[in-house]
Image: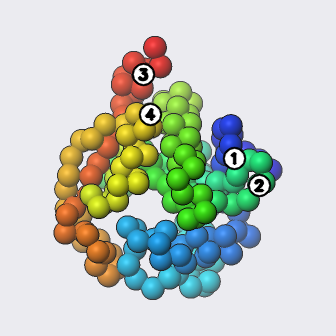
């Protein structure tokens, strides 16, 4: 297995074309998708024809940044995904951090462990100036991960033109957290 990043308990690897069932299972759980998407679960053809090709094209398009399958290191079981890639309309030295995990992996510190490792890699290996993450105001678990990873609150805002059905709690807005390279360096001293 080619690992992009390994931590004490996690392995992050590139997605592969044969990861269809893993992506379907993760994105098919309404609890996992609660703060992400309110529409019907993606179909197999949508994952095969659109989602996975989009994931796979990221690595070359973004110079090694992208989306990674997260495996439990001890068992090699797929437990979620991480994102660290440039966001549309943002400077090229900025990247967005994101994560999504199976319910069975919630509350075990995996998201925080992986987020810290990706922040380190983003600043040390990719020379990023700023990494940000966003979550719905009503998603305390995701906000806790950002805070534990050393990110700081920047703003609360309302998403404009979000695709799909309304998501419960969206009227409260989203929050953005960030960590700059200078802040990261100060934390490492």
Residue 60 or 106: which is nearer the viewer?
A: 106
In the drawing, does residue 70 fall left or right of residue 146?
right
Please name the residue shown 64% across and 54% down the image. Answer: 70
Residue placed furthest toward the front: 107
Query: Element type at marker 4?
Result: loop
For the residues labelled 4 and 1, the Cα–Cα distance comes to 22 Å
For the residues labelled 2 and 4, the Cα–Cα distance comes to 29 Å
Residue, disc 2: 76
Residue, disc 1: 11
Q: Is residue 67 visible?
A: no
Query: Element type at marker 3?
Result: helix
Q: Position of residue 164 (x, y in %)?
A: 34, 79
Identify the disc placed on residue 19. none
Q: Closer to the N terminus: mark 4 or mark 1?
A: 1
Residue, disc 4: 128
Disc 4 crowd, CA 10 A, few/some/many (<14, 14-19, 20+)? some
Dot in front, 4 or 3: 3
Q: How is this picture coloured?
A: rainbow
Marks 2,3: beta carbons within 8 A: no
Marks 2,4: beta carbons within 8 A: no
Q: Is residue 189 above or below residue 184?
A: above
Residue, disc 3: 187
Residue placed furthest toward the top: 189
Q: Closer to the N terminus: mark 1 or mark 3?
A: 1
């Amino acid at each position: 297995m080619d690992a992009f990043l390994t931590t004490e308990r996690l392995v992050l690897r590139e997605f592969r074309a044969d990861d269809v069932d893993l992506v379907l299972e993760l994105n098919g759980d309404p609890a996992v998708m609660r703060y992400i998407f309110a529409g019907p679960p993606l179909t197999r053809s949508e994952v095969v024809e659109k989602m996975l090709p989009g994931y796979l094209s990221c690595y070359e398009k973004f110079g090694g940044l992208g989306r990674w399958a997260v495996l439990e290191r001890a068992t090699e079981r797929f437990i979620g995904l991480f994102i660290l890639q440039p966001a549309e309309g943002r400077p090229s030295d900025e990247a967005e951090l994101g994560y999504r995990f199976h319910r069975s992996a919630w509350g075990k510190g995996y998201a925080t462990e992986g987020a810290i490792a990706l922040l380190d890699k983003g600043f040390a290996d990719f020379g990023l100036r700023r990494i940000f993450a966003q979550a719905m105001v009503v998603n305390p678990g995701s906000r806790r991960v950002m805070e534990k990873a050393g990110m700081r609150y920047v703003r609360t805002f309302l998403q404009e033109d979000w695709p799909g059905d309304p998501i419960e709690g969206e009227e409260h807005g989203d929050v953005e957290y960030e960590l700059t390279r200078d802040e990261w360096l100060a934390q490492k001293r």
